[in-house]
Amino acid sequence: THVSGTIVGENYGIFAAKDTEIQLIDVRIFPPSGSTLSTTLINAYDAVINYLLSNPGKKVIINMSLSGSNWSEKDKRLRIIHELGGIVFAAAGNGDTDASSRSPASSNTSITVGNIERDNTRRWSSNYGDTVDIWAPGT
């Protein structure tokens, strides 16, 4: 996706793949229809947890450009990922509502990112609130 390319591109990005030993791992949860089940997301969380358990000390950054309803099973797994050393970046969401009502944005173990316009004002559709840790261009 474009977000992965922003993080790690062949020549450009936050990390340029040619200059580092960054490894992208695709954990696909969305079919072409664009919606998924919470159980599919739970399975993806479990895959990350198993990866971290199998690779102790490995640094993992997880990008979650998604938003869904809060559910304790998702929060439990996000805490485990955090405890195992994973860093989760979560989109605040695009519902123009308090991000504390959405997962993974509501997790106190994720770094939640809200969407701003070119003039550094909140994008009208971006979720907001106390759980938003940082704001970044996303429009």
Image: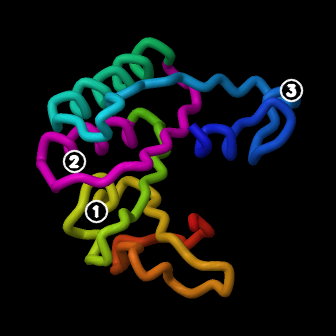
Few, some or many C-alpha atoms within 10 Å of disc 1 (few <14, some 14-19, many ≥20)? Answer: many
Looking at the image, which residue sits at the far left? 72
**Furthest-front residue in this view:** 33
In the rendered image, the vertical position of residue 52 relative to residue 107, given as above or below: above
> Do residues under tags 2 and 1 come within 8 Å of each other at their CB atoms?
yes
Is 39 covered by the magenta stretch? no
Residue depicted at 36% across the width and 49% down the height: 66
SS for tag 1? loop
The amino acid beneath tag 3 is: Lys
Who is closer to the viewer here, 63 or 138? 138
Q: Which residue is mark 2?
A: 75
Image quadrant of residue 61?
top right
**Circle on res. 18:** 3
| Left/right of residue 2 with respect to residue 84 in the rendered view | right
Secondary structure found at label 3: helix
Q: Check disc 2 and give the amino acid type.
A: Asp
Q: Position of residue 25 (x, y in %)?
A: 53, 23
- Residue 55 position within the rendered picture, expressed as x and y whole percent measured from the top left: 50, 16
Which mark sits nearer the N-terminus, 3 or 1?
Answer: 3
Q: Is residue 82 magenta?
A: yes
Give the vertical position of 63 relative to 137 (above or below): above
Give the CA separation, mark 2 to mark 1: 9 Å
Q: Tags 3 and 1 in contact by the CB under 8 Å rule?
A: no
Compared to residue 11, the image places residue 79 above or below, namely below
Residue 131 or 28: which is nearer the viewer?
A: 28
CA distance separating discs 3 and 2: 35 Å
| Applied colour scheme | rainbow
Residue occupied by mark 1: 106
* Magenta residue span: 56-83
Q: Residue at x 43, y 12 (%)?
A: 54
